Image: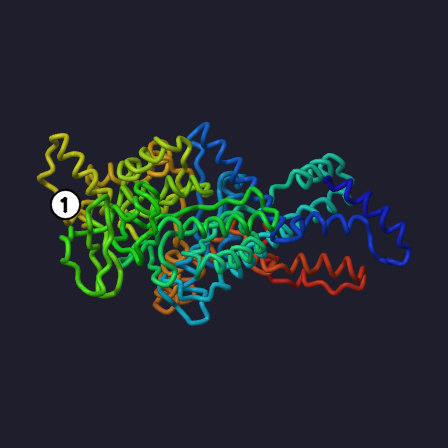
Amino acid sequence: MSYQTLIENAGKLLQANEHWTGITPDSVARMKIQNRFQTGLDIARYTAGIIRSDMDKYDRDPSKYTQSLGCWHGFIGQQKVISLKKHFGSTERRYLYLSGWMVAALRSEFGPLPDQSMHEKTSVPALIEELYTFLRQADARELGMLFRDLDKARVAADNVGEQQLQQQIDNYQTHIVPIIADIDAGFGNAEATYLLAKKMIEAGACALQIENQVSDEKQCGHQDGKVTVPHEDFVAKIRACRYAFLELGVDDGLIVARTDSLGAGLTKQIAFSAKEGDIGDQYNSFLDCEEVAAGEHLNGEVLITRGKTVLRPKRLRSNLYQFREGTGADRCVLDCINALQNGADLLWIETEKPHIEQIASMVDRVREVIPNAKLVYNNSPSFNWTLNFRQQVFDTWGKEGRDVSTYDRAKLMDEAYDGSALATEADERIRTFQRDSSQRAGIFHHLITLPTYHTAALSTDNLAKEYFGDQGMLGYVANVQRKEIRQGIACVKHQNMAGSDIGDDHKEFFAGEAALKASGVHNTMNQFAA
């Protein structure tokens, strides 16, 4: 609805309520525009439509992949989206990712925790709500500045400028972007997953990422000791998430089914199988077993049959069962196909390295069954990108017969190689990884789970080294404030970013000329005027 239409509608409402004194139609319209999304469900419905549209675009053109960065605080998410609008003029095909790893490490009341689902599950929907609170505030702030410019144009009788500003307001692009939110392994049984999914959706999440690990044995995807569940258990949780979306009226909500099978060598239980070849039998076929002769079984043993053969699955003292080595890729493919056939929208294959052909080798097999299968991929900081890609180039050159005798494959991380031809090619492969893998390996969405965890640590280390060292205050001024000013970082006016101008506008709406505003001539923020 246009700004002018909102003014007209507010005017009619105020005329019908003559005792609502001191309220102007223009102010009502501005507040409505500055708060476009009334609830988290409004946000979830809006952003689900964005991802669905982006998926269609990707199916037609794989160069139209999407991206996100993991954010552990509302302010970090807000600054990321402000930066996107500043540098690219649009938030198109760019999302936020909510990482369970960062919630555990940074948002738990227990303090820093490993990524093992030990943190309070309520902290996940709380962070979603916080992210969208900050993004909505970014809308209010930016629109407020447009309204101030509009007032100046009106005072100056600048009709052309007034019309241009009204068009900017009517065509304003919100900071609200989709969040793909990590629900881990569901934090319990399917009912627990459903209850948490509802809270996450009500907070604004349009896409839930759930993994096929055992909830009470959950591990970070890049750590050892991962334990998967049979497909029926995982499908029950996918259904729980879908029911949550449908109950809340987010019919386009998305489910990202993540498989950790590539690095998971254990299962907690043998799958139920009603007949040979069903999904339970397929799951069990990957178990590490030995044939048992008649009468050879011992008390308390668990045995299964495969055809007429009696087998003893390898059972560990932990009461877990072991898969055969080398079956991880096959299990991933089966996981992906089964998840898509039972309600998932997107896939996530957790890998141990960023290798396009490894990813493509699995996605190609999935696409033989489901041609439009699409992947969400973790461009993880857990990978040593420099070493991995230098080794990939080393291996490629070796196969091509090129001379690699001047390189030590095990020591390619060494700074001495930084200017070499091998390092240059590796860096180019890293630069184009997202583009190339989206084209070759069906990756629709690229995310980095915890980049802002690392950037916060790096920038704080640099500031502490300078400020507490010989540089003193210059360490802050030269490396932070001066760069903020020259790079046009909005946060240099931190009072404005925290909402002081929004508050002043409201004071004027509420109290008129009696308003005591903070943005007068003595506000030191004026030192940063453009």
- Kindly give the residue lying farthest to the bottom in the view shown: 110
| Residue 365 screen position, x and y as percent | 31, 34
How did the renderer colour the structure?
A: rainbow
User: Vertically, is 313 above or below 104?
Assistant: above
Residue placed under numbered mark 1 in the picture: 409
Q: Is residue 34 left or right of residue 112?
A: right
The one of 202 and 436 positioned closer to us in this rendering? 202
User: Vertically, is 464 above or below 173?
Assistant: below
| Residue 57 screen position, x and y as percent | 49, 31
Q: Is residue 502 left or right of residue 337?
A: right
Q: Is residue 345 left or right of residue 526?
A: left
Q: Residue at x 21, y 42 (%)?
A: 390
Q: Residue at x 22, y 47 (%)?
A: 387
Q: Residue at x 41, y 56 (%)?
A: 185
The one of 341 and 253 positioned closer to us in this rendering? 341
The one of 155 and 294 positioned closer to us in this rendering? 294
Q: Quick check: can you spot residue 74?
A: no
| Residue 217 screen position, x and y as percent | 34, 62
- Kindly give the residue lying farthest to the left in the view shown: 405
Q: Quick check: can you spot residue 449?
A: yes
Q: Residues within 10 Å of mark 1 (few under 14, many from 20)?
A: some
User: Vertically, is 229 above or below 344?
Assistant: below
Question: Which quarter of the figure has residue 441?
Answer: top left
Q: Residue at x 41, y 37 (%)?
A: 374
Question: Which quarter of the figure has residue 521?
Answer: bottom right
Q: Disc 1 marks which amino acid?
A: Arg
Q: How many marks?
A: 1
| Residue 349 screen position, x and y as percent | 34, 45
